[in-house]
Image (spheres, rainbow, N blue to C red):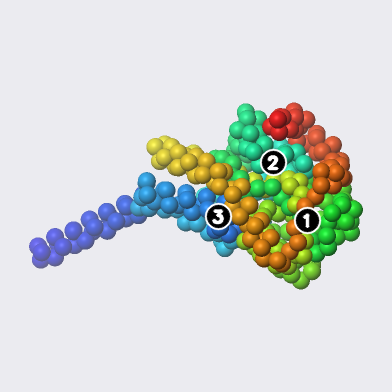
Protein backbone atom coordinates (compact mmCIF):
# COMPACT_ATOMS: atom_id res chain seq x y z
CA UNK A 1 0.00 0.00 0.00
CA UNK A 2 2.77 2.31 1.07
CA UNK A 3 4.71 1.37 -2.07
CA UNK A 4 1.67 2.21 -4.29
CA UNK A 5 1.25 5.59 -2.57
CA UNK A 6 4.94 6.43 -3.08
CA UNK A 7 4.85 5.33 -6.70
CA UNK A 8 1.76 7.47 -7.30
CA UNK A 9 3.43 10.45 -5.66
CA UNK A 10 6.52 10.00 -7.83
CA UNK A 11 4.41 9.68 -10.97
CA UNK A 12 2.44 12.79 -10.03
CA UNK A 13 5.59 14.76 -9.34
CA UNK A 14 6.93 13.64 -12.71
CA UNK A 15 3.79 14.77 -14.49
CA UNK A 16 3.90 18.12 -12.75
CA UNK A 17 7.54 18.58 -13.66
CA UNK A 18 7.04 17.74 -17.31
CA UNK A 19 3.93 19.94 -17.27
CA UNK A 20 5.99 22.80 -15.93
CA UNK A 21 8.71 22.22 -18.51
CA UNK A 22 6.12 22.09 -21.27
CA UNK A 23 4.48 25.30 -20.07
CA UNK A 24 7.83 27.05 -20.24
CA UNK A 25 8.49 26.23 -23.89
CA UNK A 26 7.66 29.19 -26.07
CA UNK A 27 6.85 28.40 -29.68
CA UNK A 28 7.63 30.95 -32.36
CA UNK A 29 5.95 30.10 -35.64
CA UNK A 30 7.76 31.97 -38.43
CA UNK A 31 5.61 31.90 -41.52
CA UNK A 32 6.64 33.26 -44.92
CA UNK A 33 5.83 32.91 -48.59
CA UNK A 34 9.15 32.36 -50.37
CA UNK A 35 11.51 29.42 -50.89
CA UNK A 36 14.25 28.37 -48.46
CA UNK A 37 16.99 29.34 -50.94
CA UNK A 38 16.06 33.04 -51.01
CA UNK A 39 17.42 35.71 -48.63
CA UNK A 40 14.30 35.63 -46.45
CA UNK A 41 14.14 31.82 -46.51
CA UNK A 42 17.79 31.64 -45.44
CA UNK A 43 17.23 34.25 -42.72
CA UNK A 44 14.34 32.35 -41.18
CA UNK A 45 16.39 29.12 -41.07
CA UNK A 46 19.39 30.92 -39.62
CA UNK A 47 17.22 32.41 -36.87
CA UNK A 48 15.83 28.95 -36.08
CA UNK A 49 19.33 27.44 -35.91
CA UNK A 50 20.80 30.14 -33.69
CA UNK A 51 17.86 30.09 -31.27
CA UNK A 52 18.23 26.33 -30.95
CA UNK A 53 22.00 26.57 -30.39
CA UNK A 54 22.03 29.48 -27.98
CA UNK A 55 18.71 29.26 -26.14
CA UNK A 56 17.65 25.67 -26.70
CA UNK A 57 14.39 24.46 -28.14
CA UNK A 58 13.20 23.30 -24.72
CA UNK A 59 12.88 27.04 -23.98
CA UNK A 60 12.10 28.57 -27.36
CA UNK A 61 11.11 26.44 -30.30
CA UNK A 62 11.19 28.16 -33.68
CA UNK A 63 9.09 26.53 -36.38
CA UNK A 64 9.66 27.80 -39.92
CA UNK A 65 6.90 27.51 -42.53
CA UNK A 66 8.15 28.60 -45.98
CA UNK A 67 6.37 28.81 -49.35
CA UNK A 68 2.95 29.97 -48.04
CA UNK A 69 2.63 26.50 -46.42
CA UNK A 70 0.90 27.84 -43.35
CA UNK A 71 -0.43 31.21 -44.49
CA UNK A 72 -0.26 32.96 -47.85
CA UNK A 73 0.40 36.66 -47.94
CA UNK A 74 -3.25 37.61 -47.86
CA UNK A 75 -3.60 35.88 -44.51
CA UNK A 76 -0.26 36.11 -42.72
CA UNK A 77 -0.85 39.58 -41.30
CA UNK A 78 -4.25 38.61 -39.91
CA UNK A 79 -2.68 35.48 -38.47
CA UNK A 80 -0.02 37.58 -36.75
CA UNK A 81 -2.62 39.95 -35.33
CA UNK A 82 -4.58 36.97 -34.00
CA UNK A 83 -1.48 35.32 -32.54
CA UNK A 84 -1.69 32.27 -34.85
CA UNK A 85 1.91 33.02 -35.86
CA UNK A 86 4.48 34.99 -33.91
CA UNK A 87 6.91 36.19 -36.56
CA UNK A 88 6.52 37.10 -40.22
CA UNK A 89 8.57 39.14 -42.70
CA UNK A 90 6.24 40.51 -45.37
CA UNK A 91 7.52 42.60 -48.21
CA UNK A 92 7.22 46.30 -47.35
CA UNK A 93 4.67 46.66 -50.15
CA UNK A 94 2.22 44.52 -48.19
CA UNK A 95 1.86 46.93 -45.26
CA UNK A 96 -0.27 49.17 -47.45
CA UNK A 97 -3.39 48.45 -45.39
CA UNK A 98 -1.71 49.45 -42.13
CA UNK A 99 0.46 52.44 -42.94
CA UNK A 100 0.85 54.91 -45.75
CA UNK A 101 4.37 55.94 -44.79
CA UNK A 102 5.95 52.55 -45.44
CA UNK A 103 4.72 52.91 -49.01
CA UNK A 104 7.68 55.19 -49.58
CA UNK A 105 9.64 52.03 -50.41
CA UNK A 106 7.37 51.34 -53.40
CA UNK A 107 7.94 54.63 -55.22
CA UNK A 108 9.45 53.68 -58.58
CA UNK A 109 13.11 54.59 -59.16
CA UNK A 110 13.43 56.08 -55.68
CA UNK A 111 16.49 54.03 -54.74
CA UNK A 112 19.49 53.62 -57.05
CA UNK A 113 20.33 50.23 -55.60
CA UNK A 114 19.94 48.01 -52.53
CA UNK A 115 22.73 49.88 -50.71
CA UNK A 116 20.66 53.05 -50.87
CA UNK A 117 17.70 51.12 -49.41
CA UNK A 118 20.03 49.98 -46.63
CA UNK A 119 21.24 53.51 -45.88
CA UNK A 120 17.70 54.83 -45.68
CA UNK A 121 16.65 52.02 -43.34
CA UNK A 122 19.59 52.82 -41.06
CA UNK A 123 18.66 56.53 -40.94
CA UNK A 124 16.52 57.95 -38.10
CA UNK A 125 13.56 58.27 -40.49
CA UNK A 126 13.93 54.69 -41.69
CA UNK A 127 14.26 53.31 -38.15
CA UNK A 128 11.19 55.20 -37.02
CA UNK A 129 9.06 53.30 -39.52
CA UNK A 130 9.77 50.08 -37.62
CA UNK A 131 7.65 51.28 -34.72
CA UNK A 132 4.98 53.00 -36.81
CA UNK A 133 2.54 50.06 -36.63
CA UNK A 134 2.91 49.10 -32.96
CA UNK A 135 -0.58 50.27 -32.07
CA UNK A 136 -1.96 48.16 -34.88
CA UNK A 137 -0.37 45.11 -33.32
CA UNK A 138 2.87 44.87 -35.34
CA UNK A 139 6.26 45.59 -33.89
CA UNK A 140 9.07 45.90 -36.45
CA UNK A 141 12.27 44.15 -35.41
CA UNK A 142 14.44 44.82 -38.45
CA UNK A 143 14.67 45.10 -42.21
CA UNK A 144 15.81 42.25 -44.38
CA UNK A 145 16.81 42.73 -48.00
CA UNK A 146 15.80 40.79 -51.00
CA UNK A 147 16.82 42.87 -54.00
CA UNK A 148 15.91 45.08 -56.91
CA UNK A 149 12.86 44.27 -59.03
CA UNK A 150 12.89 43.27 -62.68
CA UNK A 151 9.88 43.04 -64.99
CA UNK A 152 9.10 39.78 -66.77
CA UNK A 153 6.66 39.22 -69.62
CA UNK A 154 6.09 37.10 -72.68
CA UNK A 155 6.74 40.02 -74.99
CA UNK A 156 9.95 42.04 -74.92
CA UNK A 157 9.61 45.17 -72.78
CA UNK A 158 12.25 47.60 -73.93
CA UNK A 159 10.24 50.79 -73.88
CA UNK A 160 7.54 51.67 -71.33
CA UNK A 161 4.98 51.68 -74.17
CA UNK A 162 5.62 47.95 -74.64
CA UNK A 163 3.79 47.32 -71.35
CA UNK A 164 0.60 49.07 -72.45
CA UNK A 165 -2.50 46.88 -72.37
CA UNK A 166 -0.68 43.97 -70.69
CA UNK A 167 -1.84 42.37 -67.45
CA UNK A 168 0.72 42.45 -64.66
CA UNK A 169 0.53 40.81 -61.28
CA UNK A 170 1.39 43.16 -58.44
CA UNK A 171 1.69 42.83 -54.68
CA UNK A 172 -1.15 44.36 -52.66
CA UNK A 173 0.05 47.95 -52.88
CA UNK A 174 -1.73 50.98 -54.29
CA UNK A 175 1.58 52.57 -55.26
CA UNK A 176 2.39 49.57 -57.43
CA UNK A 177 -1.12 49.74 -58.88
CA UNK A 178 -0.52 53.33 -59.97
CA UNK A 179 2.95 52.47 -61.23
CA UNK A 180 1.53 50.05 -63.81
CA UNK A 181 -1.42 52.30 -64.57
CA UNK A 182 1.10 55.01 -65.46
CA UNK A 183 2.29 52.60 -68.18
CA UNK A 184 -1.29 52.12 -69.39
CA UNK A 185 -1.03 48.50 -68.30
CA UNK A 186 -3.56 46.46 -66.28
CA UNK A 187 -2.22 45.70 -62.80
CA UNK A 188 -3.81 42.94 -60.74
CA UNK A 189 -3.19 42.43 -57.02
CA UNK A 190 -2.54 38.76 -56.41
CA UNK A 191 -1.06 36.59 -53.67
CA UNK A 192 2.49 35.45 -54.34
CA UNK A 193 1.56 31.76 -54.23
CA UNK A 194 -0.81 32.20 -57.17
CA UNK A 195 1.58 33.91 -59.56
CA UNK A 196 3.20 30.90 -61.22
CA UNK A 197 -0.09 29.40 -62.26
CA UNK A 198 -1.46 32.73 -63.43
CA UNK A 199 1.60 33.17 -65.65
CA UNK A 200 1.45 29.61 -66.89
CA UNK A 201 -2.20 29.77 -67.86
CA UNK A 202 -1.86 33.22 -69.36
CA UNK A 203 -4.28 34.76 -66.85
CA UNK A 204 -1.61 37.46 -66.55
CA UNK A 205 1.08 38.50 -69.02
CA UNK A 206 3.84 39.43 -66.64
CA UNK A 207 4.98 40.42 -63.16
CA UNK A 208 7.73 42.29 -61.32
CA UNK A 209 10.06 40.60 -58.89
CA UNK A 210 13.62 39.97 -57.76
CA UNK A 211 15.96 37.49 -59.45
CA UNK A 212 15.79 35.18 -56.43
CA UNK A 213 12.00 35.05 -56.48
CA UNK A 214 11.82 34.72 -60.27
CA UNK A 215 14.24 31.81 -60.08
CA UNK A 216 12.95 29.96 -57.02
CA UNK A 217 9.31 30.23 -58.06
CA UNK A 218 10.23 29.15 -61.61
CA UNK A 219 8.57 32.23 -63.13
CA UNK A 220 11.37 32.28 -65.69
CA UNK A 221 10.17 28.95 -67.06
CA UNK A 222 6.89 30.55 -68.10
CA UNK A 223 8.18 33.99 -69.15
CA UNK A 224 10.11 34.61 -72.37
CA UNK A 225 11.69 37.93 -71.37
CA UNK A 226 12.95 39.69 -68.27
CA UNK A 227 13.73 43.38 -68.49
CA UNK A 228 16.56 44.31 -66.13
CA UNK A 229 14.90 47.49 -64.96
CA UNK A 230 15.93 47.67 -61.29
CA UNK A 231 13.02 50.09 -60.93
CA UNK A 232 12.21 49.29 -57.30
CA UNK A 233 13.08 46.99 -54.45
CA UNK A 234 11.55 44.08 -52.61
CA UNK A 235 12.57 44.36 -49.02
CA UNK A 236 11.07 43.05 -45.81
CA UNK A 237 10.15 44.14 -42.33
CA UNK A 238 10.48 41.37 -39.77
CA UNK A 239 7.47 41.89 -37.52
CA UNK A 240 6.18 40.25 -34.37
CA UNK A 241 2.84 40.53 -32.67
CA UNK A 242 3.35 43.51 -30.31
CA UNK A 243 1.72 41.87 -27.28
CA UNK A 244 3.56 38.59 -27.75
CA UNK A 245 6.91 40.31 -28.11
CA UNK A 246 6.58 42.83 -25.31
CA UNK A 247 5.27 40.20 -22.89
CA UNK A 248 8.24 37.87 -23.37
CA UNK A 249 10.52 37.61 -20.30
CA UNK A 250 12.94 40.52 -20.61
CA UNK A 251 16.17 38.51 -20.73
CA UNK A 252 14.77 36.13 -23.31
CA UNK A 253 13.54 38.97 -25.47
CA UNK A 254 16.97 40.56 -25.32
CA UNK A 255 18.58 37.27 -26.38
CA UNK A 256 16.15 36.88 -29.27
CA UNK A 257 16.77 40.47 -30.36
CA UNK A 258 20.52 39.93 -30.35
CA UNK A 259 20.13 36.81 -32.49
CA UNK A 260 17.78 38.61 -34.86
CA UNK A 261 20.24 41.50 -35.27
CA UNK A 262 23.00 39.06 -36.17
CA UNK A 263 20.75 37.30 -38.66
CA UNK A 264 19.77 40.66 -40.15
CA UNK A 265 23.41 41.51 -40.80
CA UNK A 266 23.98 38.12 -42.45
CA UNK A 267 20.83 38.23 -44.61
CA UNK A 268 21.62 41.72 -45.80
CA UNK A 269 25.18 40.75 -46.58
CA UNK A 270 24.21 37.77 -48.71
CA UNK A 271 21.02 39.05 -50.39
CA UNK A 272 22.70 40.66 -53.39
CA UNK A 273 24.93 37.63 -53.91
CA UNK A 274 21.94 35.26 -53.90
CA UNK A 275 20.13 37.46 -56.41
CA UNK A 276 23.15 37.62 -58.71
CA UNK A 277 23.55 33.84 -58.43
CA UNK A 278 19.93 33.37 -59.48
CA UNK A 279 20.25 35.92 -62.28
CA UNK A 280 23.12 33.82 -63.59
CA UNK A 281 21.10 30.61 -63.30
CA UNK A 282 18.25 32.17 -65.26
CA UNK A 283 20.65 33.47 -67.92
CA UNK A 284 22.22 30.01 -68.25
CA UNK A 285 18.87 28.23 -68.47
CA UNK A 286 18.46 29.56 -72.00
CA UNK A 287 14.75 29.76 -71.21
CA UNK A 288 14.41 33.48 -70.91
CA UNK A 289 16.05 36.39 -72.61
CA UNK A 290 17.36 39.05 -70.24
CA UNK A 291 16.87 42.49 -71.75
CA UNK A 292 19.51 44.99 -70.65
CA UNK A 293 18.52 48.61 -70.93
CA UNK A 294 20.67 51.53 -72.01
CA UNK A 295 20.79 54.59 -69.77
CA UNK A 296 18.40 56.40 -72.13
CA UNK A 297 15.97 53.48 -71.99
CA UNK A 298 16.07 53.42 -68.18
CA UNK A 299 15.36 57.16 -68.23
CA UNK A 300 12.28 56.56 -70.37
CA UNK A 301 10.92 54.06 -67.80
CA UNK A 302 11.71 56.45 -64.98
CA UNK A 303 9.88 59.26 -66.74
CA UNK A 304 6.86 57.10 -67.52
CA UNK A 305 6.51 55.98 -63.90
CA UNK A 306 7.31 59.34 -62.31
CA UNK A 307 3.71 60.67 -61.95
CA UNK A 308 3.25 58.12 -59.14
CA UNK A 309 5.41 60.22 -56.82
CA UNK A 310 3.08 63.22 -56.90
CA UNK A 311 0.02 61.01 -56.42
CA UNK A 312 1.34 59.64 -53.13
CA UNK A 313 3.36 62.58 -51.84
CA UNK A 314 0.68 63.71 -49.42
CA UNK A 315 -0.01 60.24 -48.00
CA UNK A 316 3.64 59.31 -47.56
CA UNK A 317 4.92 62.76 -46.63
CA UNK A 318 7.25 64.96 -48.66
CA UNK A 319 9.89 64.95 -45.90
CA UNK A 320 10.03 61.19 -45.78
CA UNK A 321 10.42 61.00 -49.56
CA UNK A 322 13.21 63.55 -49.32
CA UNK A 323 14.98 61.56 -46.59
CA UNK A 324 14.72 58.40 -48.67
CA UNK A 325 16.05 60.13 -51.81
CA UNK A 326 18.98 61.48 -49.81
CA UNK A 327 20.13 57.89 -49.21
CA UNK A 328 21.26 57.71 -52.85
CA UNK A 329 24.17 60.03 -52.35
C1 LIG B 1 5.86 39.02 -53.79
O1 LIG B 1 4.70 38.90 -53.36
O2 LIG B 1 6.13 39.08 -54.98
C2 LIG B 1 6.99 39.10 -52.79
O3 LIG B 1 6.66 40.03 -51.81
C3 LIG B 1 7.24 37.79 -52.15
C4 LIG B 1 8.29 37.89 -51.10
O4 LIG B 1 7.98 37.74 -49.93
O5 LIG B 1 9.45 38.11 -51.50
Determine crowd level at label 1: few under 14, some 14-19, many 20+ residues with C-alpha closer than 10 A: some
| Residue located 57% across and 43% down the image | 268
Task: Kindly identify which residue carries mark 1.
Answer: 291
Circle 2/circle 3 CB separation < 8 Å: no
Residue 325 is situated, as x and y percent measured from the top left of the image, at 74, 32
Determine crowd level at label 2: few under 14, some 14-19, many 20+ residues with C-alpha closer than 10 A: some
Viewer-proximal residue among 124 and 329: 329
Residue 170 is situated, as x and y percent measured from the top left of the image, at 75, 55
Task: Kindly identify which residue carries mark 2.
Answer: 113
Closer mark to the observer between disc 1 and disc 2:
1
Does residue 310 appear left or right of residue 147 in this picture?
A: right
Viewer-proximal residue among 97 and 289: 289
| Residue located 45% across and 42% down the image | 259
Which quadrant would the N terminus be assigned to in this image?
Answer: bottom left
Residue 24 is situated, as x and y percent measured from the top left of the image, at 36, 49
Residue 20 is situated, as x and y percent measured from the top left of the image, at 31, 52
Q: Which mark is residue 213?
A: none
| Residue located 77% across and 52% down the image | 292
Q: Earlier in the sequence, mark 1 or mark 3?
A: 3
Task: Kindly identify which residue carries mark 3.
Answer: 41
Dot 1: element: strand
Whether residue 77 is visible to the viewer of this picture, yes or no, is no
Q: Earlier in the sequence, mark 1 or mark 2?
A: 2
Does residue 22 appear left or right of residue 202 in this picture?
A: left
Amino acid sequence: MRFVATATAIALAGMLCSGAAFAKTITIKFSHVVADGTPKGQGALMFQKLVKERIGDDKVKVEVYPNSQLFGDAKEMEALALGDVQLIAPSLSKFDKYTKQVQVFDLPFLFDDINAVDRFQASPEGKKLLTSMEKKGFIGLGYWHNGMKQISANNPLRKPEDAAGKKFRIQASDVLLEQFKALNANPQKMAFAEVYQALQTGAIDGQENTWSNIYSQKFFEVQKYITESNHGAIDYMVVANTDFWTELPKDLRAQLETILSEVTVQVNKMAEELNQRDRQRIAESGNTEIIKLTKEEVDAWRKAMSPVWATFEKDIGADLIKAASAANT
